[in-house]
Image: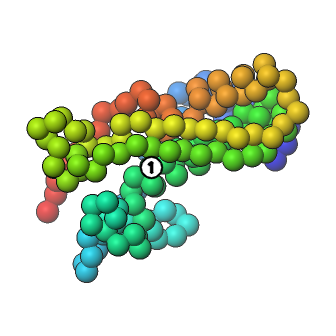
Amino acid sequence: MDREQLQAVQSPLKAQYREDPAAALVTLHAEGRLGDEEISCSVETGRALVDAGLHPATGGSGALACSGDMLLQALVACAGVTLRAVATSLGLEVAGTIRADGDLDFRGTLGVGKEEGVPVGFTRIRLAFDLQHEAGEEQIATLLRLTERYCVVYQTLTGGVPVEISYAS
């Protein structure tokens, strides 16, 4: 998709959302089914079924996807798509790779580090872009600034969002 194609697709959406902000409100869904034989949860991705299970650091075999890895993968996917869209809008040709690394202390997950205040979850996430381009430094700085601004997963992780839990039987 080139810049003109992207603008042709997005311009009517932007106009619609300006006129009717409620039209831009969308609820995304994810659903999983608890595994019967292993400590696992099968998640429908829209393209395939992913079986998630325990990370080896918590007793898993490593044969199933780790939800922590899936979180980092979602960040990489969102940042990559956002970067490509922004680059296209700016008329920049870029290629390369994106990497997310996250630090976890699994004592928190296993309830072993309560006395020391070991948290459950990532304590740090690093998102790195290795880009090949012929753009100037100022253009790349703008590209990265706009990618950061418009990446949904990045903004959700850095800004936080209320998460509600409910139960039904």
- Left or right of 17? Residue 106 is left
Q: Nearer the viewer, residue 163 or 20?
A: 163
Amino acid type at circle 1 is: Leu
Applied colour scheme: rainbow
Q: Is residue 43 above or below residue 75?
A: below
Q: Nearer the viewer, residue 116 or 154?
A: 116
Percent across and percent down for residue 73 are 52, 52
Q: Residue furthest top?
A: 138
Could you tell me which secondary element the residue under label 1 belongs to? helix
Percent across and percent down for residue 130 are 70, 41
Q: Is residue 107 above or below residue 61?
A: above
Q: Is residue 73 above or below residue 127?
A: below
Percent across and percent down for residue 91 are 85, 32
- Quarter holding residue 141: top right
Q: Nearer the viewer, residue 35 or 116?
A: 116
Percent across and percent down for residue 131 are 75, 39
The reply to whether residue 145 is in sight is yes
The residue where tag 1 is placed is 71
Residue occupying image coordinates x 22% and y 46% = 108
The reply to whether residue 91 is in sight is no
Residue occupying image coordinates x 85% and y 42% = 2
- Quarter holding residue 158: top left
- Left or right of 70? Residue 116 is left
